[in-house]
Structure formats: structure tokens, C-alpha cells
Amino acid sequence: MKTTPQIYKKQSVKPVWCPGCGDYAVLSALQKSFAGLGLKPEEIIIVSGIGCSGRLSHYLNVYSLHGTHGRALPTAVGAKAVRPGLTVLAVGGDGDGLSIGGGHISHAARKNPDITYLLMDNSIYGLTKGQTSPTTPAGHRSTTAPYGAAEEPMEPIPILITYGVSFVARVTSLNIGQMTEVITAAVKHRGMSIVYIHSPCVQFRAMPWESLKDRIGILPAEYPVADKMKALAAAYSTDPFYTGIFYLEEKKVLEDRLKDIEAAAGGRRGGSPALAAKEIMENFR
Ligand SMILES: Cc1ncc(C[n+]2csc(CCOP(=O)(O)OP(=O)(O)O)c2C)c(N)n1
Ligand code: SF4
Ligand SMILES: [Mg+2]
């Protein structure tokens, strides 16, 4: 089967994002990545949170679930645990992934499921009309901070590296080619991949995009991608503001651990591969 970006596009649902929204670039890059990887639409599951970014799952002709706010990641982990043969992705915004859902990333990282999480940061709650988010710059005036945000913004890339996420990358909606390459590498990586995407909101302009654009640099080819300390240094650099793959580590994935546990549990029962619910209940008599 020949795979082209068009086959992943849902014909019946057209995007309703504002003209110029960075999220169009993410949709386009994702379709190109799927095509390049030669994946069949029925081999892909995408779970999204709530937000303008969360709408992305509607626009794809793959298995999709537009779930609850902040819960895309645990739902995707569950999907991969029961359907390990499929390519599973989660997608959501900075509010979804770093506010209400922020506690899930560290625990998903400990499990290291073979999934890809696209975290789309526009430094604001876009869908609900412009409330302050964890990455809104201090002092930015919004509907929830009319006199300016009182908090400093989070630094997500060092946090993701420290959490032990096994593939950490950052891209921007300005460079669809780079985004396509990085998403492709993230999907290929066997383990938990996070692609952090600066995807500006043209309606509620919270991200200091103009000053950021001039500082964007691509991590050099000789950059040591498996060196965690160097990754942290690169992640804290503000000029250049690096894009590319910061950190990559091969380690055991959740699906393999679950197989080991299943085998161990079966072994205790005289080699039977899995315990029936009835047998488990008998242990409690
Ligand atoms: C449990 C729950 N709390 C709050 C909301 C309201 N809500 C919907 S989207 C959203 C924030 C969206 O911001 P973000 O995740 O950054 O996505 P964006 O729209 O910016 O892409 C909020 C607070 C909700 N739907 N469910
Ligand atoms: S409100 Fe912002 S994030 Fe939402 S569609 Fe419009 S530009 Fe995009
Ligand atoms: Mg947002």
C-alpha cells in the first residue's frame, strides 16, 4: 500500500483552528511522518486531551479518542499496554499536559511505554479564551491575570530530561521539515518519546514569539544525544534557543516488562500463561 499524507486526513471533518494557528503545522508534519513511516491508518491510535490542540485527533483518519482534559497520556499508556502492536500517540496543550495533567508525565516516564507524546505549547489556554498557563511569561496580562501573571514560566525541557523520558525533543511550527523528521524519529524510538512543540496561538499572543524567532538554532550534528548533562546544558540555553533531539536513551519498555510479569505470574501457577479471573479470586478464599 502506497502511503501519502492525504490518506491520514479525515475528509468529513475540517479544521476549525484560527487562520495562522501553529497547530496546522503540527497536523501537516504528523501526516507526513505517518506517510514516510509507511504506517497504515488502521495501525495508528491517537489520544488527545482537551484544548485547541486536542482537536487534532478529529482531523486524522486513524483510530482516535478525544479524551478528558489532562488525561491523554495515561489513556495512551493504557492503549499501548493492551494493543502493543499498534503505533500509539498522545497529543495535547501546555495547559492539558503541564497543569491538570502535569503529574502524569513523570510516572509515564518511569514506565517507558513505546508511545509518542506531542506536547503543543502556545503559552496560554487557547480553547477557553486566554487564561494563564504554566508556560505563560511572568507579567503577561490574561483573562485570569489582568494585572499580569505573578509566576515565572516552567522550563519543560530540563524537567522532561530529569524525569527520565527516554526521547526528548523540541521543535517549532516555523519549521515543518524539521518537525516531520523529529516526529518520525520519535515514533521510531522504542520507548517514551516527547516532542515539545512551540505552536503559537495567533489569537492570544502570550508567547514572546518575535524575540524567540531570532534566537532559534538547530542542535549541531556532533551534539552528544546520549549525554544527559550536556542535554540539560543545551536545554537551559536561551541563545541559541535550541531545537532538535536533546536526549535519547534505549531502555526497557513497559510492554516488555508486562510480558515478564505475565510470564512470572503464569510460572507460579504451574506454567499456565495467564490467570483467569476465577482462579485469581480463589486465592482469596
Ligand atoms: C476537568 C476540566 N477542567 C477544565 C476544563 C476546561 N478547559 C478546557 S481546555 C482547557 C485549557 C486548554 O489549554 P491547553 O491545554 O493549553 O490547550 P490549547 O487550547 O491552548 O491548545 C481548559 C482549562 C475541562 N474541559 N475539563
Ligand atoms: S485560539 Fe489560538 S490555539 Fe486556538 S485555534 Fe485560535 S490560534 Fe489556535
Ligand atoms: Mg495552550
Image (spheres, rainbow, N blue to C red):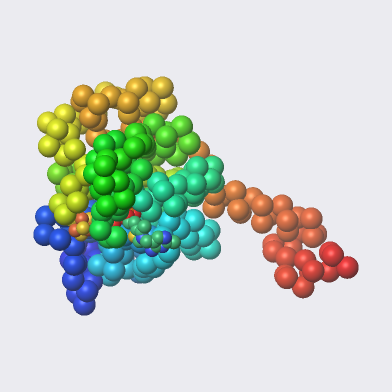
Looking at the picture, tell me which residue is in the foreground, 94 or 65.
94
Quadrant assignment for the C terminus: bottom right
* Residue 166 point in image, percent of width and height: 44, 38
Residue drawn at x 30%, y 40% is 149
Residue drawn at x 60%, y 48% is 257
Up-down: is 118 above or below 84? Answer: above
* Residue 216 point in image, percent of width and height: 17, 32
Looking at the picture, tell me which residue is in the foreground, 94 or 177.
94
Asked if residue 64 lies left or right of residue 106, the reply is left
> Total of numbered circles in the picture?
0
Residue drawn at x 43%, y 64% is 68
Up-down: is 180 above or below 170? Answer: below
* Res 258 seen here: yes
Asked if residue 75 lies left or right of residue 237, the reply is right
Name of the residue lying farthest toward the front: 147
Quadrant assignment for the N terminus: bottom left
Asked if residue 259 lies left or right of residue 240, the reply is right
Asked if residue 240 lies left or right of residue 102, the reply is left
* Residue 115 point in image, percent of width and height: 42, 52
Up-down: is 154 above or below 69? Answer: above
Name of the residue lying farthest toward the right: 285
* Res 227 seen here: no
Residue drawn at x 26%, y 42% is 147
- Ligand 1, seen in the image, is in the quarter at bottom left
Looking at the picture, tell me which residue is in the foreground, 90 or 266.
90
| Residue 171 location, quadrant | top left
| Residue 155 location, quadrant | top left
* Residue 85 point in image, percent of width and height: 46, 60
